[in-house]
C-alpha cells in the first residue's frame, strides 16, 4: 500500500504548518476586531435625521452650524447648537468644553462623539475650519450635494 504510516518528520512538518496557519488566523481576527472597534465613520445631517448611524457608538458628524442656534450655559462650558445641511435636515449637538476660536454660526464643523436614541449628538471633540479657503472634505460634500439638489429643484 502506497499510503502507509506517516513518517515522523513529515508529521512534525504538517503539525508546524497547521499551528502557523491557526496562529496567523487568530492574529488576523484580533487585528480586524481592533480596527472595527476603533473606526468612526462620517455621517451627514440627513443621514442622522434618517436614523442611519448607530446609537451609542463613536461617529463623526458634520455640516454647517445653523444660524441663531448656538446656546451657551451661563454657569459652565456647556454649548448646544444645531448642525444643518442647508436642506432642512439638522440635528442638535451638546458639547462641554472650549470651542475652537473659529467656531461660529454659518461655518463648517465636524464633531466626534455619540448619538443617543433621541437624536441628540453628544460631542467629545469639535473641529472648525481654519481659514476662509478650507472646509472639511466631508462638510464640503454635504454642502455641494445640497446645492446640486437646490439647483435641480429650480
Image: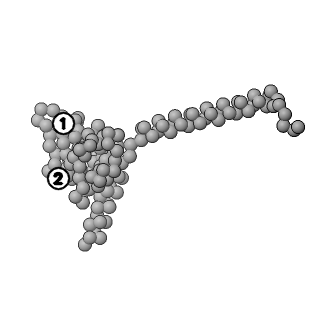
Q: Nearer the viewer, residue 152 or 103?
A: 152
Q: Is residue 78 visible?
A: yes
Q: Residues within 10 Å of mark 1 (few under 14, many from 20)?
A: some
**Quadrant of residue 59 in the image?**
top left
Q: Position of residue 135 (x, y in %)?
A: 31, 52
Tell me the residue at 84%/37% (across/down). Answer: 3
Count of numbered circles in the view: 2
Q: Could you tell whether 54 is left or right of 96 in the image?
A: right
User: Disc number at residue 78?
Assistant: 1
Q: Are marks 2 and 1 in contact (CB under 8 Å)?
A: no
Left or right of residue 23: residue 94 = left
The residue wearing badge 2 is 67
Q: Earlier in the sequence, mark 2 or mark 1?
A: 2
What kind of element bears circle 2?
loop
Q: From the viewer's perspective, is 37 left or right of 21?
A: left
130 and 149: which is toward the camera: 149
Q: Residue at x 53, y 37 (%)?
A: 29
Name the residue furthest right: 1
Can residue 126 be seen here?
no
From mark 2 to mark 1, how far is it between C-alphas?
18 Å
Circle 1 — which element? strand
Q: Residues within 10 Å of mark 2 (few under 14, many from 20)?
A: some
Q: Position of residue 21 (x, y in %)?
A: 65, 35
Tell me the residue at 25%/72% (across/down).
154
Name the mark on residue 30.
none
Extreme-left residue of the structure: 74
Residue 68 is situated, as x and y percent measured from the top left of the image, at: 14, 50
Q: Residue furthest bottom?
A: 154
Q: Nearer the viewer, residue 64 or 149?
A: 149
Colour style of the rendered protein structure? one colour
Amino acid at each position: 500500500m502506497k499510503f502507509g504510516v506517516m513518517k515522523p518528520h513529515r508529521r512534525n512538518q504538517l503539525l508546524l504548518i497547521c499551528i502557523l496557519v491557526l496562529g496567523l488566523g487568530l492574529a488576523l481576527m484580533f487585528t480586524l476586531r481592533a480596527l472595527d472597534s476603533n473606526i468612526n465613520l462620517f455621517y451627514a445631517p440627513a443621514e442622522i435625521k434618517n436614523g442611519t448611524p448607530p446609537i451609542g457608538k463613536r461617529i463623526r458628524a458634520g455640516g454647517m452650524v445653523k444660524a441663531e442656534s448656538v446656546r451657551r450655559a451661563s454657569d459652565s462650558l456647556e454649548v448646544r447648537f444645531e448642525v444643518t445641511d442647508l436642506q432642512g435636515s439638522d440635528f442638535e449637538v451638546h458639547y462641554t468644553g472650549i470651542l475652537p476660536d473659529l467656531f461660529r454660526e454659518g461655518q463648517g464643523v465636524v464633531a466626534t462623539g455619540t448619538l443617543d436614541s433621541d437624536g441628540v449628538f453628544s460631542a467629545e471633540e469639535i473641529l472648525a475650519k481654519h481659514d476662509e479657503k478650507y472646509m472639511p472634505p466631508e462638510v464640503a460634500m454635504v454642502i455641494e450635494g445640497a446645492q446640486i439638489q437646490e439647483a435641480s429643484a429650480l
